[in-house]
Image (cartoon, coloured by chain):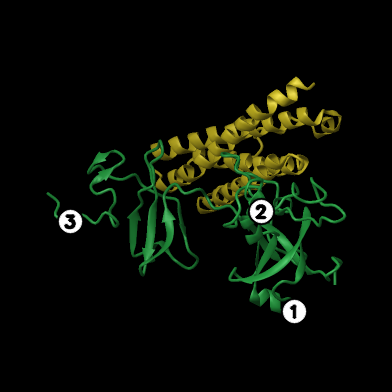
Amino acid sequence: MNDGIALAVRALHRGERNLAGELARAADRHRAEHEIHHVATDLAVRSREHVRRIAATAADREVDLTGPPEAGDASDAVFAPHGTRSSAETADALDPGLLLLRDLRELHLSATANSLHWEMLAQLAQAARDPALLSLASACHPRTLRQTRWTNTMIKTMSPQVLTSL
Amino acid sequence: MELSLDRIDRPWGERTPYGRAEPWPTRVDSCLADGVEPEAVARWVQSASLLDSRGDAMDIAVLDGRIVGVRGRAAEYLAPHEEPDEEYPFQLTTGRTLYHFHTRTKTGRTPQLNAAAPEVWVEVSAEDAHRPGLGEGDPVEVSTPRGSLQARLRLSDVRPGALFVPFRYGYWDTPAGSGPGEKTPPRAANETTITDWDPASKQPLFKTAAAALTALDHGGGTR
């Protein structure tokens, strides 16, 4: 199978799995913020669905999703998932509002990375004349964009409150 | 000239969002009743709903002369954020009553209207009421993870498993004035529902909650 497809599928699998986890953690951490709690929970379900669909596609095409990329395959590391940098240890020391803004920023960046990967996969699918792959990207990408719109809107809503009250 | 155009069946005629005789956009989202497969739908009727900026509207699925679903840019289905369980076995929904308006601050001061519906009540199906031996007019408590209210029972044709409470009743006309008190049992339906809203419109979600129904004795304690 095409190496580029394997690369994009693996990048998306890691990215969506990562985002599902981040959303679930944010939903749990910000229970008192009702909209964050409920919508992040719903959006995590979408990412988990994407993970399942990507895994099914990978199984059809014998792309190995398990384990770390093979040693020496540097190209996989190019699309390493976003959002592994924020250290959980500092979380307790932070102002809850700042922590929320930080989490929203990370969610937005992770979702944006996924969105770009979906775009790459969609373009690749068209170039490779691969309708199954194109329909996967067309089905999932709009929902990833919805995730980025929500995180952006929440940052817009929360920033003035948080940053003027410091 | 077209001789007869069924405006119910084809409200758009030859027109589409892109002009006369241009193809309609492809629709992918659909929501059909349980057990109905897309292939089984007899007709997809283009609805006369307003087009959004992307130029789409909804189709209505018809089977055996009945509406069985929609297709188009209907929002994706999301399961309720709180489902009934063992502790809270009922699905509580809230709504209006004919005689009152908003929080009754006007209609509650109109003697005839107030007399028509002076107190909050709970509607339950006869099936659900008879099992624990409850009857019309019995005092009950409806409780959810957030709070509770006390009211008289009405047997009605709500579906089994559901409870209905009108949301009109607050505390402005009670002895306590602003909340439940010694002579004012809790009665505000919206304080029992989940704190949640639509992320786009911010419309609060006062319509679903998991709830428990308990019989009260006439003094107000649980039986």
Is there any visible trace of residue B117 in the rendered image?
no
Q: Secondary structure at mark 2?
A: loop
Which numbered disc flags the more N-terminal residue, 1 or 2?
1
Which numbered disc flags the more N-terminal residue, 3 or 2?
3
Which numbered disc flags the more N-terminal residue, 3 or 1?
3
Say which of marks 1 and 2 sits in front.
2
Is there any visible trace of residue B119 in the rendered image?
yes
Q: Secondary structure at mark 3?
A: loop
Amino acid under disc 2: Phe
Q: Position of residue A39 (x, y in %)?
A: 64, 43
Q: Position of residue A54 (x, y in %)?
A: 55, 48
Chain A shade in the render: yellow
Give the labeled residue for mark 2.
Answer: B167
Q: Residue at x 34, y 44 (%)?
A: B25
Quadrant in which residue B210 is drawn: bottom right
Q: Residue at x 83, y 28 (%)?
A: A94
Rate crowding at label 3 as few (under 14), some (14 to 19) or many (20 or more) other CA atoms within 10 Å.
Answer: few
In the foreground, B18 or A145: B18
Q: Chain of mark 3?
A: B
Q: Position of residue B175 (x, y in %)?
A: 82, 51
- Cα separation, mark 1 vs mark 2, equals 26 Å
Q: Are marks 3 and 2 in contact (CB under 8 Å)?
A: no
Give the labeled residue for mark 3.
Answer: B4
Rate crowding at label 2 as few (under 14), some (14 to 19) or many (20 or more) other CA atoms within 10 Å.
Answer: many
- Cα separation, mark 3 vs mark 2, equals 48 Å
Q: Chain of mark 1?
A: B
Q: Residue at x 63, y 46 (%)?
A: B106
On screen, residue B114 above or below A23: below
Say which of marks 3 and 2 sits in front.
2
As drawn, is A153 to the left or to the right of B30? right
On screen, residue B179 above or below B131: above
Chain letter for the green colouring in the rendering: B
